[in-house]
Image (tube, grey):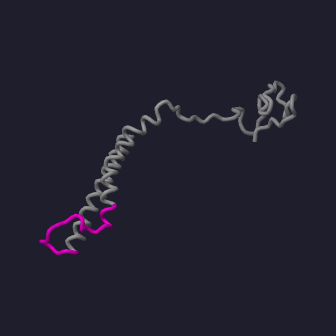
Amino acid sequence: MRFLRGLGVGVLMFVIWVFASIMGALSFIGEHGIGTEMDLALMSPIWSIPLVLSFIGMFLGPIYYWIIEPIRKKGKAPVKYTPINPAGVGKVADFCQECGWKNPSKQKFCGNCGADLSIY
């Protein structure tokens, strides 16, 4: 899945880069006419921002998903859901959540601290 994410980011940034290049060239031609010398310094600055950012993103996006993200997630255990009390809703807990006293007689209140043992 990481490979596809990185590939998708790279392709998306490439498409944006091509679009910004074409629009920048068209804006340059529209301002200066066809057949003049093309000086990239005269290109409309509005297209130079997405052009540069998408060019950088073409390489940094896949590098992040393929190299940096696996290093960051290495050694981290996946988070698992564990219920606080597996007794179930509407029943009485086998132990007290407050003091840890075992409730062998299935009372509604803890015999040690008096806390409510019913599960809502």
> In the image, residue 107 lies at what x, y percent?
85, 31
| Lateral position of residue 78 relative to residue 115, left or right | left
Q: Is residue 91 above or below residue 32?
A: above
Magenta region, residue range: 31-49
- Front position in the image: 27 or 77: 27
Quadrant of the frame with the N terminus? top left
**Does residue 1 appear in the picture of this structure?**
no
**Position of 77 compared to 109: left or right?**
left
Kindly identify the residue that appears in the image at 75 percent across and 42 percent down: 120
* Picture coordinates of residue 17, whole percent (x, y): 28, 57
Report whether 98 appears left or right of 55: right
Residue 82: horizontal and vertical position, in percent?
63, 34
Is 42 within the magenta?
yes
In this picture, is 90 found above or below 28?
above
Viewer-side residue, 61 vs 47: 47
Q: In screen coordinates, is 76 left or right of 48? A: right
Residue, far left: 35
Residue at (53, 31) in percent of width and height: 77
Image coordinates for residue 97, horizontal then vertical, percent: 77, 33
Residue appearing at x 17%, y 75% in the figure? 33
Residue at screen point 28% across, 53% down: 14
Q: Quadrant of residue 49?
A: bottom left
Q: How many labels, in total?
A: 0
